[in-house]
Amino acid sequence: MSANWPRVLDGLEHHLAGDGLLILDPPASLLGRLPASARLFSLDYSIWSRLPPARREPFGTDLPEAGTDTVLLFAPRSKDRLAWWLNRLAVTSPGASLWLAGANREGGRGIGGQVESVLDVPPRLVDRLGRASLWQCRLPVTASAHRDFWQVEQYARLAIHSLPGVFGHRGVDAGSALLLEAAAELTIAGRVLDFGCGAGLLGAVIASRGRPDALVLIDSDALAVASARRTLQANAVAGEVLPSDGWSQVSGRFDWIISNPPFHRHGQPSLDTVSAMIAGAGDHLHSGGRLLLVANRHLPLERVLAEHASAVEETAASKHFKVLLAAGFAGGASLPSSRPRTASGGGR
């Protein structure tokens, strides 16, 4: 089980009184219980869009640089992303009191060492409650230099830019590579949507091959949106990158939807996101439009696709992944006959 966040918040309540409180990346279970005077910030568009508009900071990667006396950060599972948070806070809120809450099963017990290694300040362990660890320190008074967390991977002569915690930050994954191999055998044109774009690999590669009429990339993570925008710009690829909670900010219809969708939610295995994507595809595809996605081989996505599409085909496979092509979402076209191809690829 993850942390009992309401219990954690109750334990913190007397430490967080007063003005000048900034709360970062609050979990969904706390959205109705956050202190009324706090300013709120989230990198997750699905969370950010549910925060009170008058109290939330603009969506993106830029933290507010004034009026912050106390910061409460709900620490991410990713150590790289925690380092990004700590560096940004040292720049934007020098001298502020920093509180960190981390789920024990997601590295909360080890936060102290990570904080000291980034800030050179030893935090104190305040408490362990609700399956979480609570830490506190004061951010260095002397503003730190902004550290460059960008990483660049080369793929098909393109430079793929990413920030910590963005899918593909540690290298191009085997599933995406398999999908791009399969996509090379197809004519992908017209309006193209990259659903859950991460660093923008799929959209950038497909656009560089075929020059679609329009390219739209969406993701719910602010660092992914920033990464995909930089990837497109660095490779002179025309396209629009939007933050979106699933289909929430998508308008118009497309000829192709491509995706390496997430199969985890809040650190737990889940088909919720991909199932919602498939269920909404028919409302966002032209008649005859197609959906191309990659998934772990053991996942029963063919059954999910068959509920919404009249034709489903496996077009490529490796030891760990499969690429599925679906059509007929809107009384549409049949698929061209082809044989599944087996390609080498690593697992993840």
Image (cartoon, rainbow, N blue to C red):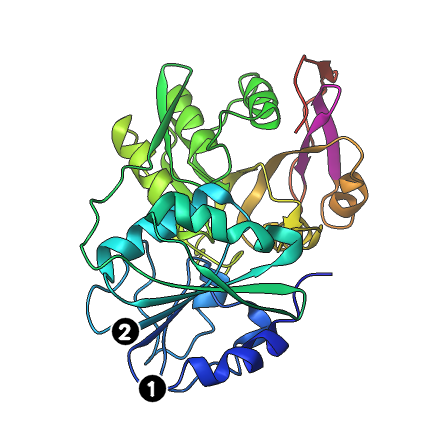
Tell me the kind of residue under disc 2: Asp
Give percent across and percent down for residue 236. 25, 27
Which quarter shows the C terminus?
A: top right
Residue 319, magenta (yes or no): yes
Q: Which residue is mark 1?
A: 18
Q: Secondary structure beneath disc 2?
A: loop
Q: Which residue is mark 2?
A: 69
Left-right relation of 231 to 206: left
Tell me the kind of residue under disc 1: Gly
Residue 58, quarter of picture:
bottom left
21 is higher (above) or lower (below) than 169:
below
44 is higher (above) or lower (below) than 118:
below
Give percent across and percent down for residue 59. 34, 61
The Cα atoms of the two marked residues, 1 and 2, are separated by 9 Å
Residue 140, quarter of picture:
bottom left
Give percent across and percent down for residue 26. 49, 68
Q: Secondary structure beneath disc 1?
A: loop
Tell me which label, 1 or 2, sits earlier in the chain. Answer: 1
Residue 347, quarter of picture:
top right
**Is the magenta region chiefly helix, strand or loop?**
strand
Give percent across and percent down for residue 342. 72, 13
Is residue 165 visible to us here? no
Binning the other alpha carbons within 10 Å of mark 1 as few (below 14), some (14 to 19) or many (20 upward) gives few
Q: Are marks 1 and 2 in contact (CB under 8 Å)?
A: yes
Q: Identify which residue, 290 or 158, lies in the foreground.
A: 158
Residue placed at 31% from the left, 69% from the top? 57
Q: Identify which residue, 335 or 232, lies in the foreground.
A: 232
Is residue 311 visible to us here? yes
Residue placed at 33% from the left, 86% from the top? 18
